[in-house]
Image (spheres, helix red, strand yellow):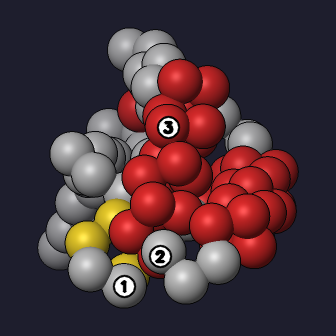
Amino acid sequence: MIFYASEVCQVKASELHKGRFVMVGDAGYASGLTSVGTSLAMAGAYILAGETSEHGDDIAAAFRADEQRMRPPTNGLGQMPRFVTSFMASQTA
């Protein structure tokens, strides 16, 4: 008997930050199978560092500014074409 299961799913958070916690990279931007996860992680870390430097002790303002800059370019990411599961997670034996 062979058992095979596969699931490709994605969760998008309504906010990238909560308190003193910020999600970057795949955790924050849910880039899916777009092959840009590493690039987004590096860009996100760079932008977050710049915003925390610019806002000094006002971490909440830095996190809001980071989210305002990162949301627009990442909003359209992660839309998987229907055919992806046919070759990434084959449904046949």
Image coordinates of residue 84 in percent, x first then y, are 49, 26
**Residue 39 falls left or right of residue 72:** right
> Label 1, on which residue?
20
> Label 3, on which residue?
68
Whichever of callouts 2 and 1 sits on the residue coming sooner in the sequence is 1
> Label 2, on which residue?
59
Mark 2 nearby-residue class (10 Å; few <14, some 14–19, many ≥20): some
- The amino acid at mark 2 is Ile
Q: Which mark is residue 77?
A: none
Q: Residue at x 47, y 76 (%)?
A: 59
- The amino acid at mark 3 is Gln
Q: CA distance from mark 2 to mark 1?
A: 7 Å
Q: Is residue 88 above or below residue 23?
A: above
Image coordinates of residue 87 in percent, x first then y, are 54, 33
Q: Marks 3 and 2: in contact by CB < 8 Å? A: no
Q: Is residue 68 above or below residue 6?
A: above
Q: Nearer the viewer, residue 85 or 57?
A: 57
Q: Label 2's element?
A: helix
Whichever of callouts 2 and 3 sits on the residue coming sooner in the sequence is 2
Q: Residue at x 73, y 42 (%)?
A: 35
Q: Label 1's element?
A: loop
Mark 3 nearby-residue class (10 Å; few <14, some 14–19, many ≥20): few
Q: Nearer the viewer, residue 64 or 3?
A: 64
Whichever of callouts 3 and 1 sits on the residue coming sooner in the sequence is 1
- The amino acid at mark 1 is Arg
Q: CA distance from mark 2 to mark 3?
A: 14 Å
Q: Quadrant of the N terminus?
A: bottom left
Can residue 35 be seen here?
Answer: yes
Q: CA distance from mark 3 to mark 1?
A: 17 Å
Q: Residue at x 64, y 77 (%)?
A: 56
**Residue 19 falls left or right of residue 89:** left
Q: Nearer the viewer, residue 32 or 12?
A: 12
